[in-house]
Image: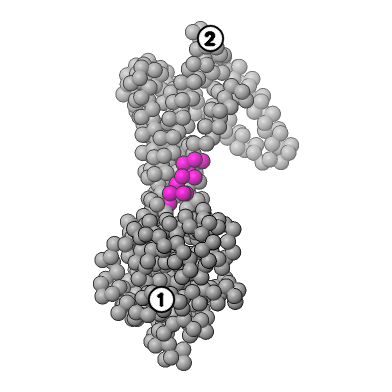
Amino acid sequence: MTSIHIELWQVAASLSLVALAAAISLWRGADLEGDIGLATARSFVQLTLVGYAIKLIFEADTIWLVLALLSVMVVFGAITARHRAAKVPGSFGPLLVALALAGAATLGLVVALGIFEPTPRYLVPVGGMVIGNAMTASAVALNRLGDEMEEARGRIEATLALGATAREAAAPSVRRALRSGMIALVDSTKTTGLIFFPGTMVGMLLAGASPTDAVRLQLILLYVLLGSVSISALTATALAYRNFFTPAAQLREA
Amino acid sequence: MLFELQEVGFDRGSRAVLDGLTAELPEGATAVVGPSGAGKSTLLRLLNRLADPARGRIAYRGRPLGSYEPLALRREVALVPQLPALLPGTVESNLAYAADLAGEQLDLDHALRLAGLSPDFAAREVSKLSVGEQQRAMLARALAQRPRVLLLDEPTSALDHAARDAIEAALGKLRRELEISIVLVSHDPEQARRLSDWVLRLESGRLAACGPLEEVLA
């Protein structure tokens, strides 16, 4: 694969589109100029730092640094997702386990099946995507779980009153939360190639790879992401619903 | 004695919803009366361990309530909440679910009839029922578990006279046909007179009176 080189002026030039976005926001009163500015600054700083970190990890070429980086991603992912799951008591633990399990299971499987080599060049970018998507899915799932448990409080308590276990009483809410966490990726996987080109494929084409290779790698990543998203949403919801109940199968006071 | 309460207290946040409540509820039909916010519904939830008291002790048939396994207790002491909260599906699927949880064979027609519903309600979608019909379906669902005690939270609060009379007739029939004890929360002293023989009156979470109907609601 031929590698391409991007100059800083090229990055700077693309800021004209950010200016356009800010101008539209200002013109139509969307009140997003501040957020657009912050998002632009943060993306620049964060990606630049991560770029240097990845460079270091690639140069060191040791699996331990990769694991350290992925662990940091899991912790920050769980902290970030926790804000979306504000209505779920004690959501950090379930999110941490969900992200760690999704990352470990999917990366472990792709390495075990020989799809990718266990080297930093594969594990860092793929791990980042896996954990990032797992974070979004589990955050959406727990956000929905919080709403569901609040709305269905009467029905859940009425079901507990019949002698159902907490798991049985919460099952419809947990099912809908799991579905919300997974549906976005399932839908975008359905339309991929028709309505949008996913990022990896675009990146590889821009970098000069053959379309066949770009498509195949993209397919692998989409399927890996489906796995990680379902593991994380399942784990997060299966652990988090318990926090709404006492050990005596009573709904905790909201 | 069906239930014995000793110095029972329950808090919501920093507010005591029930405080220092000592009373005895015998077998038969007890009405829990009092103004709204007096703690009537909370008391009912404590009786089948949907919540546990913060202070004091409750005994059911002579044994501490906490010593009963909560799920088994709830199948024996069934609570029908004030607002209907059936599971999506048909009336029959709701009754079957409840019977299955209690490990009971479902006698659909019998449970529906006891609750004052005709057998053709079985196939009806619960979302298509009126509030009064849903209330009776909730009652039928509880009865499908063959409980020994029924805890009813304002079973007729949202109903018109005809629907209220239907529920009251169903409850009267229940007491005659089954050996079942009832604890009924009601804000209506007249309903307490019609349906109960023992009355517990709460005011601001404290006991105002407890005893035979003719003494308390003289």
Horizontal side of residue B159 vs A101, given as left or right:
right
How far across and down, in percent of the image, does residue B205 sit? 43, 77
The span picked out in magenta is: A170-180
Q: Is residue A172 magenta?
A: yes
Q: Label 2: how many residues lie within 10 Å, few (<14), some (14-19) or many (20+)?
A: few
Q: Label 1: how many residues lie within 10 Å, few (<14), some (14-19) or many (20+)?
A: few
> In terms of secondary structure, what is the magenta stretch mainly?
helix
- The residue at the point 28 percent across, 65 percent down is B68
* Farthest right residue in view: A27
Horizontal side of residue B182 vs A143, given as left or right:
left
How far across and down, in percent of the image, does residue B5 sit? 32, 77
Looking at the rendered structure, which numbered label has been put on residue B177?
A: 1
Quarter of the image where the C terminus of chain A is located:
bottom left
Query: What residue does disc 2 label?
Result: A210
Both marks 2 and 1 on one chain: no
Q: Is residue A14 above or below residue B207?
A: above
Q: Is residue B45 above or below residue B3?
A: above
- The residue at the point 41 percent across, 71 percent down is B151
Q: Identify the amino acid type marked 1.
A: Glu
Give the quadrant of residue A249. Answer: bottom left
Q: Is residue A253 magenta?
A: no
Looking at the rendered structure, which numbered label has been put on residue A99?
A: none
Give the quadrant of residue B180. Answer: bottom left
Query: A249 and B54: which one is in front?
Result: A249
Label 1: state its secondary structure: helix
Query: B52 and B55: which one is in front?
Result: B52
Q: Alpha-carbon distance for marks 2 and 1? A: 81 Å
- The residue at the point 51 percent across, 81 percent down is B191
Q: Identify the amino acid type marked 2.
A: Ser
Q: Which marked residue is nearer to the observer: mark 2 or mark 1?
A: 1
